[in-house]
Image: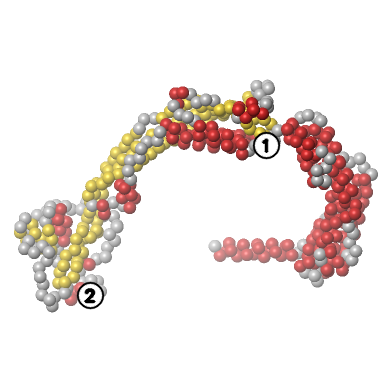
Amino acid sequence: MKINIYYLVFAIILGFSIQSCRTGKKAYQKGNYYLSVIQSVDKLRNQPKNKKAKAALREAYPLALNTMELNSQNLLASNSPDKWKLILNNYNKINRMYEEILRSPEALKVISQPKNYYAEIENVKKNAAEESYAKGLTFLQKNTRTDAITAYQLFLEAQSYIANYKDTNKKLEEARIMATLIVLVLQDPLPVSFSVSGNYFRNKIDEYLHSREAQNFIEYYNPAELASMGLQPDHQILLRYQEFDIGNVYFKESKEQLLRDSVIIATIKREKTADDNQPDGGNNNNRGGDNNRGGDNNADDNNNNDKDDKDDTHDKIKVCHKGKTLEIGQSALQAHLAHGDKIGACNDRKGATVASDKIMIDVPIYGTVKATLTTYEKTITSTAMLSMTIYETQAGKVLKEEIFPAKYVWITKWGTFNGDERALTKAQLELCEQKEHAAPTRDENFNVLSEQFFKKVTQNINAFYQNY
């Protein structure tokens, strides 16, 4: 990571160094005198004492000026259809060099009298506007959609030189109408067997198509809109549902036995001993095990008898078993509790009164907890199919055909458990808090499938008409 950061810092420093080295010399050597002037002046604005920039500016400016003036004179004498636009471009560059030099005191010391063409430029703009306007009329008269698009751009160009030049607003509208492709979008009525309204998809398609109106010289209409405007479509897009099916409910039930050990199942009181002051707690009853770690699924539940466990060498626990007080080991406690035995002697299950000079402590008792988890799952699968056909209206020629399948699987899950909830994970507990959800209606299923259709149809329309 450090190496990458070093490379990044180095690249940034290098980038600044390269930028700062643009004194205009390289552009001058390549014959781009105009760029050399711009870069040299910019360099002097940041570093007024830069000798290379001054030298480049001193050499490049007269060459740039002479080159553009000579080019403009040659264009004036030519029959180039774009001559006024090109002359205007030259004059704009000369004026920019003039403005840049005036903004730099050091550059002004090098070129004390930069030249400008402000006086001439308005007349050049008028000629350039007429040039573009005339060309636009020529293309408009060709009466084709492609030429109308070109004419529209030329009329816009004319207006960029002279606002509202002649009747360019009128010509722009003529060119737009001729250039615009009218597309009728037909959505066949849904079959009665579907038993759904279909309005959701129909409205979404209309909303989408209206948002794209006149984009790229393409306008979309539904049948009612087209009839009211008296227009004839160039293309038609036909959307037709082929099928819609809702499958049967699939129900699944499963059970799982859960075990978790090292869970505190009870606490007992006993007299505090000297061993309890030892760093390790004095005995293994005070272990701090992780209550959430997985347990041994083979926990022994067969210690349900009245005898004392001889493998427990530490504290014994008193329990009341059928009216009889027993002392048992910790490993047998859970089995006794499961059968209804209580912790403590039968004559005082809450704990005998102890002498006031004795200190009693609570000792946790660890064991294994169990639960049975039952999970339920219902699923309903819905499928549908939609076809899209784009064809040219007059010729009846099919331009594109596509079939879109859609599938939606509705799922509801919930659960219940019996036993100790501490045997369940957080996710399992959350599942048991869920309730069975009502299945969606036919319209709700169809609307979800319509979302898929909407995405596929609009993507295909975008791709088809992107460069049309």
Residue nearest the viewer, comparing 78 with 27 = 78
The residue wearing badge 2 is 278
Asked if residue 17 shows in the view, the reply is: yes
Q: Amino acid at mark 2?
A: Gln
Residue nearest the viewer, comparing 392 with 5 = 392
> Which residue is rendered at x = 5% and y = 59% of the image?
324
The spot of residue 435 in percent (x, y) is 32, 43
The spot of residue 373 in percent (x, y) is 27, 46
The spot of residue 110 in percent (x, y) is 87, 67
Pick the quarter of the image with the N terminus: bottom right
> Which residue is rendered at x = 39% and y = 30% of the image?
247
The residue wearing badge 1 is 214
> Which residue is rendered at x = 87% and y = 68% of the image?
109
Q: Earlier in the sequence, mark 2 or mark 1?
A: 1
Specify few, some or many for label 1: CA neighbours under 10 Å numbering under 14, 14-19, or 20 or more.
Answer: some
Pick the quarter of the image with the C terminus: top right
Image side of residue 360 versus residue 306, left or right: right
